[in-house]
Image (cartoon, helix red, strand yellow):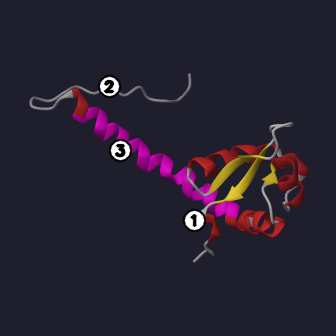
Amino acid sequence: MSGTKQLSFKLVPGENATELLNAQAQKWNHIFNFVNSMSLKCAIELGIPDIIHNHGKPMTLSELITALPIHPTKSPHVYRLMRILIHSGFFSPKITSENDQEEAYVLTEPSRLAPP
């Protein structure tokens, strides 16, 4: 037993499926915005924008992991964190060279701003 509750929705008179779907999407967007906020908080606390800025050029994942003040057991999670932050627009991926096709990270305008 997974412990999750299966929800079912019934349309009320005058309501259509599109309205119900939009309401559900809005609810889930609010719930998942927490992930974006906590990912940004984590990046700022780790100093990721400063590390990439001080590197002076696009920074690969392996370079970033080496520069971060984290325990080596946490390093596999950095890739996922960076994917969320790329999706949120705080960093941008860049291919470092045509030969190795290794992805590197660069700052975007929002990540250049100092935290409040």
In the image, what residue type sits under mark 2? Ser
Say whether residue 101 is visible. yes
Residue in the image at 60% along x and 58% along y: 90
Residue 44 screen position, x and y as percent: 68, 66
Tell me the distance, in whole angstroms, between the alpha carbons under discs 2 and 1. Answer: 40 Å
Q: Which residue is mark 3?
A: 26
Residue 24 screen position, x and y as percent: 34, 37
In the rendered structure, which disc, 2 or 3, sits on the residue that comes first in sequence? 2
Q: Which residue is mark 1?
A: 110
Residue in the image at 14% along x and 30% along y: 12
**What residue range appears in magenta?**
19-43
In the rendered structure, which disc, 2 or 1, sits on the residue that comes first in sequence? 2
Decide which of 74, 78 is in the foreground and name it. 78
In the image, what residue type sits under mark 1? Pro
Tell me the distance, in whole angstroms, between the alpha carbons under discs 2 and 3. Answer: 17 Å
Q: Nearer the viewer, mark 2 or mark 3?
A: 3
Q: Nearer the viewer, mark 2 or mark 1?
A: 1
Residue 33 on the magenta segment: yes
Which residue ends up furthest to the top in the rendered image? 1
Left/right of residue 43 with respect to residue 15 in the rendered view: right
Residue 41 on the magenta segment: yes
Residue 8 numbered mark, or none: 2
In the rendered structure, which disc, 1 or 3, sits on the residue that comes first in sequence? 3
Q: Is residue 101 above or below residue 50?
A: above
Left/right of residue 49 with respect to residue 67 in the rendered view: left
Quarter that holds the C terminus: bottom right
Residue in the image at 29% along x and 40% along y: 23
Residue in the image at 36% along x and 39% along y: 25
Say whether residue 81 is visible. no
In the image, what residue type sits under mark 3? Gln
